[in-house]
Amino acid sequence: MNNVMAIYRKEVGAYFKSPMAYIFLVFFALFNGYFFSNTFFLFGQSDMRALFNITPMIYLIFVPAVTMGVLAREKSAGTNELMATLPIKNFELVIGKYLSAFTLVLAGLGFTLIHFFSLLAVGTNIDYGGVICGYLGLALVGAFYAAIGTFTSSLTDNQVVAFILAAVFVLGFYLLDKLLIFVPAALAGPIQFMAVDYHLSNMSRGVVDSRNLVYFGSLIWLFLVLTVRVIDMRKWR
Amino acid sequence: MIRVENLEKYYGDIHALKGIDFEIDDGEIVGFLGANGAGKSTTLKIMTGFLAPSAGNVFIDDLNIQDHSLDIREQIGYLPEMNPLYGEMRVYDYLEFTSQIRGLDAGEFKTALDRVVGQCGLRDVIHLPISACSKGYKQRVGLSAAILHDPKVLIFDEPVSGLDPNQIVEIRNLIRELGQQKMVIISSHILQEIEATVDRIVIIDHGEIVANGTSQELMAGFMGRTQLTLDVKYANEESLAALTNSVDEIEVANIEAVNGRSVLSIEYAREEDPREAIFDYAKNSGWAILEMTQNQVHLEDVFRGLTGEGGRDE
């Protein structure tokens, strides 16, 4: 655990010493703010569903951008040799790196709280449970996408390639339930269950089902385990 | 003690290491010498756990790298060839991070920091970002991170590469100091550096060890007989022909006439020194000695002889 925390602190420090983190966060906040404010004042409803619909789409670019360098940068700079020869287990390295990327995603999500405070200021009959569940859903989607991005970042030493791979993966999970009309009825159920939107929409409505938590938890675990395996295999090249 | 046993490594079809065997005792500095692509760095990367061997093993006392990689990594301080560092971190932060991974508590870190800052001369740059440091200071930062936890084994891959002469002397002295208590392995393709720093030299070529010994042993083994060049005037044919029989234990390998002079190549056993007898013979024969040079064998000659050339690209 000490190693995880040491790596986590180092990585978070590196994020916030680089201008890229601030650029990502500013763009994330601007895009969310623009799309949320447009519909918020148009419909005059005291809910944040607009945000919960917009943010997963912005995540499609934001999270891969945050995670693209997580492991790819180490490999291109050669510092993976330092890490691999320190007494660190590979899973400690992956967890520390992953948590730091997830922290940046949460920081981005934190910026959207300004919209919640706007809602508190001007709205009535606010469904606090729905807002909390919606944020939990966004946090879980962010965590899931960060796990995918961490995995794709382990596959290459090129950050652009890592970004594109992650964007393709997260887009795939995002679009799965939009493709249901093209698949046989027998496969529709399992494919729908694999879609991110299916689970997120439940949570955005204020419903937290254990299946949603199992879905996010198991896929995060899967991609992190795959990342550890990729790093394990590097020494056998 | 470190024991490297029958280490083999394949990169696809390329047989990079073909059964490397050697041992290193406590308090010994061993130099790993070889041309680019000979297998030095691969051997070191396997010893540090960065690469897995295709066959063979590395032992440090009772631990081996295949089964106890983490324990072995705790006992090793490693400076990789390109000295990769986190440029955005301050020197202090990087050393603190290393100490945390090495399991030092705050008090131990403070003591270790004072020690390595003194040994490596980092006082002026300790609060600077690593990216703002000169190449020499970056090399010292890498070294200080490698020795921070006072490891039993130190492995330095090209530690003086790119340093200026003053920095090379400083780093060499530091390595010698460290080598008094620890096992130190230095890889280099700079022969003079290896010769000046280490107790023993291992020469590797095409993935095989071709020599292992002190520089004197290697030079003695490479050239069994000493060569002497004698440049004289006024030497007639009879006196030149009689030289071999007149001085014990020598053999005149060649006589060359150059502008009225005679240049002789004389060979004799390494343990013999017939120069005084040759001088007396020359004097008695009426020769004027213009030059008498006992040819020295340099490590470079040994290296070139064993590896076939000065170096080759990977």
Image (cartoon, rainbow, N blue to C red):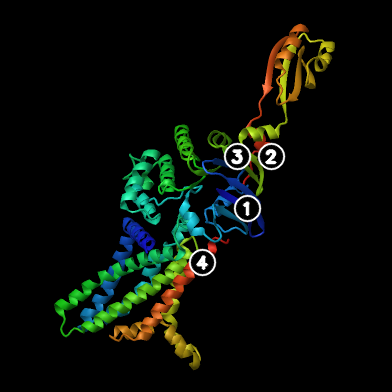
Residue ranking furthest to the bottom? A185
Of the pair A169 and A11, the residue shown nearer to us: A11
Q: Are marks 4 and 3 in contact (CB under 8 Å)?
A: no
Q: Identify the subunit bearing mark 3.
A: B
Residue marked by disc 3:
B201
| Identity, as a three-letter code, of the amino acid under mark 3 | Ile
The mark lying in front, picked from 4 and 3, is: 3
For the point 37% across and 49% down, which residue is it? B95
The mark lying in front, picked from 1 and 3, is: 1
Is residue A192 depicted above or below B149 in this figure?
Answer: below
Residue marked by disc 4:
A230
Is residue A174 depicted above or below B206 in this figure?
Answer: below
Callout 3: SS: strand
Whether residue A164 is visible here, answered yes or no, is: no
For the point 21% across and 76% down, which residue is it? A116
Q: Are marks 4 and 2 in contact (CB under 8 Å)?
A: no
Q: Earlier in the sequence, mark 2 or mark 1?
A: 1
Task: Judge left or right: residue B310 versus residue A17.
Answer: right
The mark lying in front, picked from 2 and 1, is: 1
Residue marked by disc 1:
B5
For the point 76% across and 11% down, which residue is it? B281
Q: What x and y, as percent, mark residue A201?
A: 33, 84
Q: Identify the subunit bearing mark 4.
A: A
Q: Are marks 3 and 2 in contact (CB under 8 Å)?
A: no
Whole-angstrom CA distance, mark 2 to mark 1, is 22 Å
Marks 2 and 1 on same chain: yes
Q: Identify the subunit bearing mark 1.
A: B
Task: Judge the density around disc 2: few (<14), some (14-19), many (≥20) Cα neighbours within 10 Å.
Answer: some
Residue marked by disc 2:
B306
| Identity, as a three-letter code, of the amino acid under mark 4 | Val
